[in-house]
Image: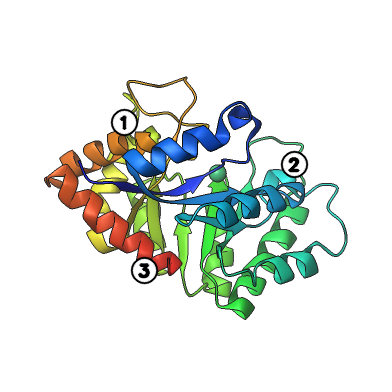
Amino acid sequence: MIKVTDTHAHYDDEAFDADRYELLDRLLSESVNKIVTVGCAFDRWEAALELAERYENVYAALGVHPEDIYDMPSDYLERLRELSKHPKVAAVGEIGLDYHYDEYDREKQIEAFRSQLMLADELSMPVIIHSRDATSDTLEILRELRPKKAVMHCFSGSVETTRQLLSLGLYISFTGLLTFKNAKKAVEACAEVPLDCLMLETDCPYMAPVPFRGERCDSSMVHMTAAKAAEIKGLDTDELIRICNENADKFFGI
Ligand SMILES: [Zn+2]
């Protein structure tokens, strides 16, 4: 079994407080190649960076998730610009739109999404995008601002949306959700994504794949998602992992 790269994890999450370093030591020596840990709120950037500094094969992505844009300091973009210059910061993210709950302030989310996309462009950095129940606004902003390198993370959209994202040059990344019994849409989308635009992730501690669904997820579980993607693509799992690892290296410059 070859080691797998996890392009999207949240190791600063409190779910890892009890065993964070032990776990990462073990994962990186046994089954995991590289990890991008995403610090997705202003007060989580330092923790993500600390992990990237501690481990050679851990990189950070820093940004403000659409659910975390409230109570931001007014100079958050300045601070993000400064921290993003750190050599272990590999991307801006996750950023985007989340319309899941009616009370979310959509205008404010759009403003933060646009500002961070422009910052990524200014810094020539790749972008990790989160989009939930907000496909048409997300596509509209992507069409307008055209990020040079972006990945749609935890994807489970339609084949039509997949095609539109691919036409905008996006990479598409799948989590353990791909292995769920009811993941028909994600499976169809995965079949549509060319191998050179495909990436794998956990979004851990969330989204544990079958047979671990509902448990705490960690990066070793990308192997289950890889096995499912390999089945969809008609490839050997190791071969698919090799391709996705290379895509991640190229995308993040890691
Ligand atoms: Zn995430």
Q: Compare residues 211 and 83 and report the one nearer the observer.
A: 83
CB within 8 Å, label 2 to label 1: no
- The residue that disc 1 covers is 179
Circle 3/circle 1 CB separation < 8 Å = no
- The residue drawn where x is 31% and y is 24% is 181
Depth order, front residue of 164/61: 61
Answer yes or no: is residue 79 visible.
yes
Amino acid beneath label 1: Thr
In the picture shown, does residue 81 fall above or below 68?
below
C-alpha gap between disc 2 and disc 3: 35 Å
Q: Give the x, y percent position of residue 151.
A: 45, 59
Disc 3 crowd, CA 10 A, few/some/many (<14, 14-19, 20+) = few
Label 2: how many residues lie within 10 Å, few (<14), some (14-19) or many (20+)?
some
Q: Disc 2 to disc 1, how far (Cα)?
A: 30 Å
Between circles 2 and 1, the one closer to the viewer is 1
Would you name the residue on which mark 2 appears?
A: 104
Q: Position of residue 99 (x, y in %)?
A: 64, 42
Instruction: Give the structural element (helix, strand or loop) at label 3.
Output: helix
Q: What x and y, as percent, mark residue 254?
A: 42, 65
**N-term mark: 2 or 3:** 2
- The residue closer to the viewer here, 181 or 124, is 124
Residue 9, how many percent across, how many down? 51, 44
